[in-house]
Amino acid sequence: MDTDVLTTALQPSRKTLLQAVLADQYPNLNLNASSTVLTTTIESAETLTKWLLDQKYEMPRSVILTEVSGRRNSIDPSLQKAANLIPVVKVQDETVTHAFSHLPTYKKSETLATLKEIFSALIQEGTAIVTVTKRNPVEEIVLNTFKTTGRRGSSGSLREFAEDQDLKALAEQARFELGKIGVSEKQVVIEGGELEGLKGSVEKILDGILSQTGDGHSWERTFDQTWSAEVEKGGGKLVIEAYVLMAMK
């Protein structure tokens, strides 16, 4: 499989999560026009930029991005200009005031590497926010849909599971001080019109993925049934669960 189709299909639900975390944490960030923000993925950079624009908040001086863009994951030119988004191969030490990153799939080695990169890049008293998905019901829906068509999301079988203490321990290994590390759990409730909008977005992405491989519309019934079952299990809504790590250097 040449792309991680599971990651692509979960993009709308991840953005919903990241926007909710930003809304929670923004009042504590002291983010302003003199700030420089490190982001480790194109998705987190674009989500941050678009959210700040939508809220009409002050844009930071620059947003540094360490994920390399390519044909399949290019940067939105309008957002790149609005945020003075600067792609780099490696960020310089002690040059950023904030870091914002999301790990859609927890893997210990990759999480530790990301936290080390963030710690080195932050100035003293710089702030990091790192979100890690705990459970995303949309993932179960998508994986079940892929199973029906004989497909498998390439990250579906590689998930490691984390607890809040695991994340604190990794942040310590990355040299953050224990007294400056906090991990909380975040639940994002999606219901009503927002739930219908999310379903439409995921369905459109799946249609684009599966129609290219000759699966046609054979998956749609499974998708609808699994979606309805997850919504019923959640009491008429979907609940995305994540850990939010907030640490200061």
Image (tube, helix red, strand yellow):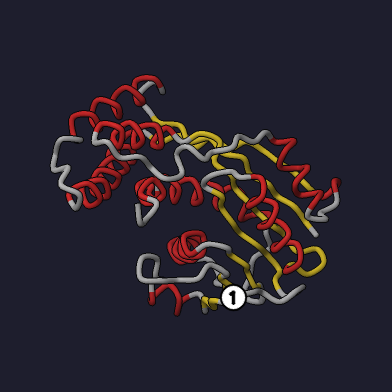
Q: Which residue is mark 1?
A: 89
Locate residue 147, reporting x and y percent: 30, 33
Is 201 placed left or right of 237 in the picture? left
Image quadrant containing the C terminus: bottom right
Locate residue 12, reporting x and y percent: 37, 49
Is 152 placed left or right of 29 in the picture? left
Snapshot quadrant of residue 191: top left
52 shown above or below 132: below
Foreground pick, 83 / 146: 146
Element type where label 1 sits in the image: loop
Foreground pick, 7 / 189: 7
Residue name at image x 42 percent, y 32 percent:
137
Is 81 placed left or right of 2 in the picture? right
Q: Residues within 10 Å of mark 1 (few under 14, many from 20)?
A: few
* Residue kind at label 1, given as amino acid type: Val
Is 11 placed left or right of 197 in the picture? right
157 shown above or below 245: above
Total labels: the figure holds 1
Locate residue 49, reporting x and y percent: 49, 66
Residue name at image x 80 percent, y 63 percent:
125
Residue name at image x 78 percent, y 55 percent:
174
Locate residue 45, reporting x and y percent: 51, 65
Foreground pick, 27 / 167: 167
